[in-house]
Image: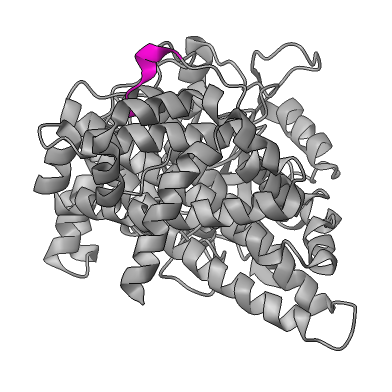
Amino acid sequence: MKNLFRALLIIFAGSSILLFSSCSTTKHKEADENWIEIFTPAGSPVASEKYSLTQVQNDYQRLMALTLELDQIADETTALRQTLLFQESPYISDVENKRIELLIFRFQNALDSLVNIADYYRQNTSPDIEVHTRGAIVGMNAALKHTYYSSRFVSLYHDKKELIKIFNSAHPSYEIPAGFYDSVAYNVTTIDNLEQFDISWALFSKELANPASTLSSVKASDPVYGKLIDEMDELHATAHIQMEYLLYARYSHYPELKDRIAHSRIARIGNDIGSDYDKSATASRGFIFKNVARMKSPTAHILTFSDQQTNEIKSMLQPGDILLTYTAGYMSDVFLPGNFKHGITYIGTVEQRRKAGLTDAVLKKEAVSEQQGDALIEHVTATTTEDGYEINIVEAVAEGVVLHSLDKLLETHINRLVAIRPKISAEERLNQLILLMQYVGAPYDFKFDFQNDAYQCCTEVVYRITDQKGTINYSLVEMKGLWILAADDILRYYLTQNPGGFDFVFLADQSSNPKDFNAVIHTGPKGLEALCELMDVKPPAQP
């Protein structure tokens, strides 16, 4: 039975390459008939970075963490469907509503992270062809999983109109707009994406069938990336089945696709592949490049910081300062209410870390093992990122708690930034920084479970390293059934409950001119007043 199922998948995958792509309006250059060139097209408008093998390995780990999260979300979504289908009441309870909102929140953020991985390797390269090939495999695996999990979700609910209404409902308290289900369905069935899906799969299969290719060499010599390729085999076929099912179920124009096969570029590619096609389809039904649309608004602009402003910001900061940021335009923004979305801790230069007390002797004394002591020393003495930026912050992102660069964030990610300084003793600050370094390498907390110390989201790190120091004593805030501390919650605690617990350092924001994206830095009492106005609170009485 299993062999029969595999045979059916091979037959389906072979036919679907001609079926899905024929009515695309996307135009491709003949020179692009190479899977890496399609995935990372020449002339990309985004400035290309040169990534290293370490970057690829880090993103591989990030991809694995996202896969585990999405597998769990898929299981929970399936269980939820059964619960909703067989309940007697036509209405959902508040508990069920919260459960749905949390699933949407987690699902969209995981999908957004997959897009970021895929987009990075679509736009950037490595001078080493084997490293470049590994990076493209990671990126395309991420893109495939985006399509697989999205189409699985849409297929699961497609014929349940009442349940679709629930997923399409707006959730104002979460700032979730109406139409979530429809937007996911649209993204996985747009015709341009379907063509790109199959074009790159065919070319990938052709190269994989060539034993002299770099791709074949990587698969044969590296079991990690060989496993990724084998995994794409089944995921690609399953995603195709799910998308065919959706097209038959949802779109009346579907039969017209067949009429355009003869004019399809993918058909010509299929003919060129010839007899090698059957071999490559057997070897790998599994490649995808879904031309994932950036889940970032094309009209969103980040702030521009001059070199002078960057230096001014760093001159005002000290190790242990808390940075709260907002980046406009990402889909995940709509699920995170507030003026600030992300929490970061500044650690400064190696010299500043040492001056704060992070010496080798102290780190070894505080470490629970010799191995951890060595790791802490390595974190404290780290100077530059793989792409050459100065390491001066610690943040929790999808790949976990990492050392990163404020300089790079100011260039690429900031629409708003505030810095506050916990008013704590030198001893408490040292303890704060040691604990922070111990969290480096921890996996990301996709569930935002502040009760579980094994996983960390961004503001969870801030909460754990500053709570119960000085006069700081946070109270977690309930957000749709979760007890968390969001970035805005930290600011509200400071501004309205404990103004003596922190010092205001600066606020960087856009000017009042909506067309001016040059950063404006506010400091002193006027800066604090601007922050309070932004947060819609009264300026705190100065202690």
Confirm whether the magenta stretch covers residue 33: yes
Q: Nearer the viewer, residue 543 or 47?
A: 47
Q: Position of residue 380 (x, y in %)?
A: 25, 44
- Would residue 101 be visible to someone looking at this image? yes
Instruction: Please provide the residue range marked out in magenta.
Output: 29-35
Residue sticking out furthest to the bottom: 88
Residue plotted at (16% across, 40% down): 216
- Would residue 506 be visible to someone looking at this image? no
Q: Position of residue 154 (x, y in %)?
A: 66, 57
Q: How is the image coloured?
A: one colour
Please determine whether, in this image, residue 280 is positioned above or below residue 150.
above
Confirm whether the magenta stretch covers residue 287: no
> Going by the image, does 128 lie left or right of 142?
left
Residue plotted at (69% across, 81% down): 82
Give the total number of marks visible in the rendering. 0
Give the quarter of the image for residue 130. Answer: top left
Q: Nearer the viewer, residue 527 or 478?
A: 478
Residue plotted at (24% across, 37% down): 276
Q: Position of residue 197 (x, y in %)?
A: 48, 37
Please determine whether, in this image, residue 337 is positioned above or below residue 104.
above
Q: Quadrant of the N terminus?
A: bottom left
> Going by the image, does 26 lie left or right of 507?
left
Q: Nearer the viewer, residue 483 or 201?
A: 201
Q: Position of residue 277 (x, y in %)?
A: 29, 38
> Going by the image, does 224 lie left or right of 515?
left
> Going by the image, does 516 lie left or right of 128?
right
